[in-house]
Image (cartoon, grey):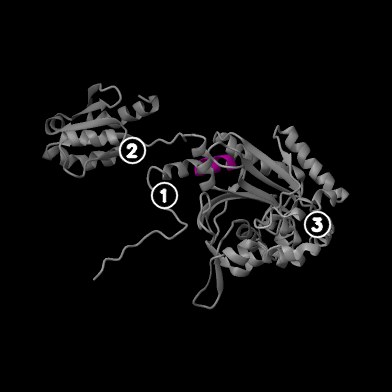
Amino acid sequence: MSEVKYSIPRGTQDILPGESEKWQYIENKARDLCARYRYREIRTPMFEQTELFARGVGDTTDIVQKEMYTFEDKGGRSLTLRPEGTASTVRSFVDQKMHGWADQPVKLFYIGPMFRYERPQSGRMRQFVQFGVEAMGSSDPAIDAEVIGLAMDFYRELGLKGVKLVLNSLGDQESRENHRNALISHFEPVIGELCSDCQARLEKNPLRILDCKKDRDHEKMAAAPSILDYLNEESKAYFETVKSYLEAMGIPYEVDPGLVRGLDYYNNTAFEIMIDGEGFGAITTLMGGGRYNGLVEEIGGPETPGIGFALSIERLLMALESQGITLPVNHGIDAYMVALGDAAKAHVPKLVHELRSAGLSVDTDYLNRKMKGQMKAAGRLHARYALILGDEELEAGTIEVKHMETGNQETIQISELAAYLQAGSVKGV
């Protein structure tokens, strides 16, 4: 019988010890920042009804047309692994009647895996992790600035350099309709020269033509009508107010009329944060977001404005690595227990358990190594102390504590060991 070899599915990754601590640090940073901004965590299912994404994300998007992992369950229902977080969060907002909560707007964040069937490449996986925030219930331009400020603070506090905020306004429904008609008139004479996707989008959603990767160099792309020329007075005033708040907050930005978010639900404020870092290639988008007034109603809820963003943790880690930024991750432990002698070894499980219960990170030998091997293990684990317990020390109620950094060694009463190590951990000695 031939041996079966199982390999990791294409477009996924194993995050091993040594790397997972970086993820934990970033996730904790996101949670801390959201707590300061008063955004609370939501956890939605990994899969939803397929129709949710077709209606919420938009049936003209690449995500819905080409990239979703869709399957039929045993009850004949069509389900889809979530390709992004906003539609699920809005579905929960409607389903759980959050619009009736006394505390408005409802401000939420999520961290979790998303799934898209794409061609795997650097920074683009088939299973990837997104951190995102959503604020629903306010049409105040100030909350647009707040959401953008949260995103900028996140990258700033992680130490990223060369981060750039790019803004655009997609306008309200009236502005978008006027722009839509102008785009149809602009592209209709040459539509046969564009790809099949663009041809299908001409009538359904011509704005998506501007986001096409295949035809980006076509002469008609650069000459396409700008949405900023079709904003009505209300949309113009809204955009100007958002920009004024960002200026007051000291957040620099660039306006790019060609910025088109890849999801159908955006209107008014749209934004991306990009990075131009050496070793990270050309200017690359780290995250994107925008306002989505109308999405809650599309999913069956009452009229409720909303705004949010999502970013890829994988892409963030690539950016940090490209700039040589080392996250302050602690890979060490407080102490490593070295046992010498049968009686000492028999006592170690109890002592290690007591130290762990006291809040200390402690490990010990489980391979019956000699003292030299145990001390090497303590070094590999970056232990602050080596705790050396022999049969004689056990009988005397003492233990030898070696400071691994200095090499100094002292004798401590076993009964006082936890307090001694706790004090040393606080002092950092």
Q: Residue at x 23, y 42 (%)?
A: 350
Q: On the rendered image, what quadrant is the N terminus found in?
A: bottom left
Q: Earlier in the sequence, mark 3 or mark 1?
A: 1
Residue 28 inside the magenta-drawn segment: yes
Q: Tell me which corner region of the image, top left, top right, bottom left or bottom right, holds residue 362.
A: top left
- Magenta: main secondary structure equals helix
Residue 136: tell me if it is visible.
no
Q: Give residue 191's position: percent from left, percent from top.
A: 76, 64
Q: Locate residue 403 relative to residue 127 in the image: left or right.
A: left
Q: Percent from the top left, x then y, of residue 268?
A: 76, 51
- Side of 425 relative to 44 (left or right): left
Q: Percent from the top left, x then y, of residue 360? A: 34, 36
Q: Is residue 219 visible?
A: yes
Q: Residue at x 63, y 63 (%)?
A: 95
Specify the label residue 361 is tagged with. 2
Crowding near the residue tagged with mark 2, few <14, some 14–19, many ≥20 C-alpha atoms within 10 Å: some
- Kindly state the secondary structure of the residue where label 2 is placed: loop
Of the two numbered discs 1 and 2 on the same chain, state the one appearing first in sequence. 1
Marks 2 and 3 sit apart, C-alpha to C-alpha, by 58 Å
Question: Element type at marker 1?
Answer: loop
Q: Which of 274 and 414 is in front in this view?
A: 274
Tell me the residue that label 3 is attached to.
176
* Residue 424 picture location, percent across and down: 34, 26
Which tag, 2 or 3, sits closer to the chain's start? 3
Left or right, 156 with reference to 189: left
Query: Which residues are drawn in magenta?
Result: 27-34
What residue is shown with label 1?
15
Q: In the rendered image, which quarter is residue 352 located in?
A: top left
Say what amino acid the circle numbered 2 marks: Ser
Amino acid under disc 1: Ile
